[in-house]
Image (cartoon, grey):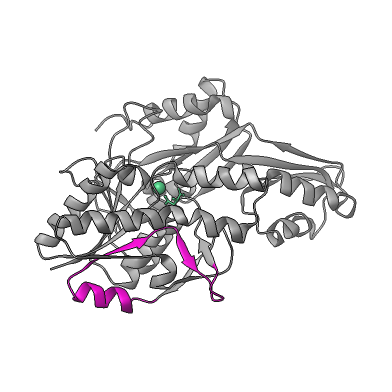
């Protein structure tokens, strides 16, 4: 007997038929003697619909109230899922995040899980129930409902698996695993049988939308065995996220290519080249809780330098506003924003033991006449910022250049 957490995304609960389908799968696991905790997202499109509705009332919705209403999407699906199970004769009980007591901090719309009370769930499991938990939401110490950021149900699933010391956390989605890149962009993309946790973390943080990044961080921290599977197929092993690099001669140098159009570039031109300037620029950005990704400072010339960084597109105006307010103190000549950028990243643990990876990437892009605006690297990743309009082309040529289309 194993304890399994199964998380189902929006497309897997999109309509009554799919919810019934999900219930049959859960019933099969239950019939094998396993204990099952099910985490569900809102029906696909529902979270977007709720956010749009909020914006019709208040253009920049109050975060506390936004969480209050957006969290209802998942409350609908937990009830429906429990009913679908009952209809199959499976004992089931549903809970919102607040009822479980998934305690988070108070950062509305992007709260972090602090702790989970597992008592109630354990008691229900021991009594033979399938427990259905609303993804994406929690409650802060003051009793306010919070949400965990878009895609947050993955994190709910993994966090519950960690808290319950589950044997496996299965993430059911509309793809049958993690691919070398998005098959909608590169039809030759292949499913990976396994990928290391570190690679998955890089891919998620570079824009692969298969798993929310926090869920991968959680899985790494608590060593949760994580598997990505399709909810539309009965068979298939999906992709297993592993913790060890297999000693495999045939391991590719690059495992995957991620991309995203979600970032925007902020350039602070002509700032004095002196100690404290990076802090003066990024301090207010951090204080406003705006995440910064790539940061570049040029070497100074004539006592001044240029400072460039990227933020989420949604936060570009806020970041520009904050810096323009401080432009005089910083002593900057100009502050500019650019939304028409994209980031393309190649990821692979094989980079550690191979040379020439960066040069192959740059050569491949140069041959297509694609200009690189920013570069950032880690031990297992090289990311470039390019003009948004060349993104898909860049992904396709890199996929080929690194042989990812060959099994
Ligand atoms: N329903 C939420 C969203 O769309 C959470 C999730 O699906 O993971 O972001
Ligand atoms: Mg998702």
Q: Is residue 188 at least partly visible in the picture?
A: yes
Quadrant of the drawing holding the C terminus: top left
Left or right of 362? Residue 310 is right
Image location of residue 363, percent across then percent down: 50, 27
How many tags in the picture?
0
The residue nearer to you, when weighing 78 against 102, is: 78
Identify the image quadrant of the N terminus: bottom left
Residue 311 shows in the view? no
What is the x, y in percent for residue 207? 48, 43
Q: Is 82 placed left or right of 219 in the picture?
A: left
Residue 291: image location, x then y, percent: 62, 54
Q: Is residue 26 magenta?
A: no
Query: Is 1 rendered above or below residue 396?
Result: below
**Range of the magenta residues?**
117-144
Residue at the far left: name it: 32
Q: In the picture provided, is 180 more to the left or to the right than 208?
A: left
Task: Specify the quadrant of the image occupied by residue 79.
Answer: bottom left
Q: Residue furthest top?
A: 368
Q: Nearer the viewer, residue 115 or 389?
A: 115
Residue at position x 60%, y 61% from top? 64
Q: Does the segment drawn in magenta span residue 123? A: yes
Q: Residue at x 40, y 71 (%)?
A: 99
- The one nearer the camera, 346 or 203, is 203
Would residue 190 appear left or right of 49 to someone viewing this image? left
| Residue 236: x %, y % from top left | 17, 44
Q: Residue furthest right?
A: 328
Where is residue 280, by image quadrant?
bottom right
């Amino acid at each position: 007997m194993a304890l399994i957490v199964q998380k189902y995304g929006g497309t897997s609960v999109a309509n009554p038929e799919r919810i019934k389908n999900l219930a049959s799968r859960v019933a099969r696991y239950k019939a094998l003697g396993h204990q099952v905790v099910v985490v569900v997202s809102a029906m696909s499109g529902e979270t977007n619909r709720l956010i749009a509705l909020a914006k019709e009332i208040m253009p920049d919705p109050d975060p506390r109230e936004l969480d209050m209403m957006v969290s209802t999407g998942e409350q609908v699906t937990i009830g429906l899922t429990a009913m679908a199970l009952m209809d199959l004769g499976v004992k089931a009980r549903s809970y919102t995040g607040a009822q479980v007591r998934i305690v988070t901090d108070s950062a509305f719309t992007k709260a972090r899980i602090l702790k989970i009370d597992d008592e109630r769930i354990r008691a229900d499991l021991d009594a033979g129930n399938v427990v259905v938990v609303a993804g994406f939401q929690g409650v802060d110490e003051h009793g306010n409902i919070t949400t965990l950021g878009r895609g947050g149900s993955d994190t709910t699933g993994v966090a519950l698996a960690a808290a319950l010391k589950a044997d496996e956390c299965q993430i059911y989605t509309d793809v049958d695993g993690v691919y070398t890149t998005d098959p909608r962009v590169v039809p030759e993309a292949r499913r990976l049988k396994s990928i290391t946790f570190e690679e998955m973390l890089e891919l998620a943080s570079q824009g692969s939308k298969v798993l929310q990044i926090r869920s991968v961080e959680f899985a790494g921290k608590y060593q949760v065995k994580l598997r990505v599977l399709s909810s539309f197929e009965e068979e298939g092993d999906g992709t297993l996220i592993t913790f060890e690099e297999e000693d495999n001669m045939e391991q590719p140098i690059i495992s995957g290519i991620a991309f995203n159009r979600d970032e925007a570039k902020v350039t602070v031109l002509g700032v004095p080249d002196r100690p404290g300037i990076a802090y003066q620029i990024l301090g207010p950005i951090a204080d406003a809780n705006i995440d910064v990704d790539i940061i570049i400072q040029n070497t100074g010339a004539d006592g001044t330098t240029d400072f460039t960084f990227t933020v989420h597109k949604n936060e570009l105006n806020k970041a520009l506003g904050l810096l323009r307010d401080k432009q005089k103190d910083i002593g900057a000549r100009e502050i500019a924003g650019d939304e028409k950028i994209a980031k393309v990243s190649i990821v692979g643990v094989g980079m550690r033991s191979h040379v020439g990876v960066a040069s192959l990437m740059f050569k491949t892009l140069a041959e297509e006449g694609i200009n690189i605006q920013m570069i950032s690297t880690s031990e297992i990743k090289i990311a470039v910022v390019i003009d948004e309009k060349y993104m898909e082309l860049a992904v396709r040529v890199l996929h080929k250049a690194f042989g990812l289309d060959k099994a």
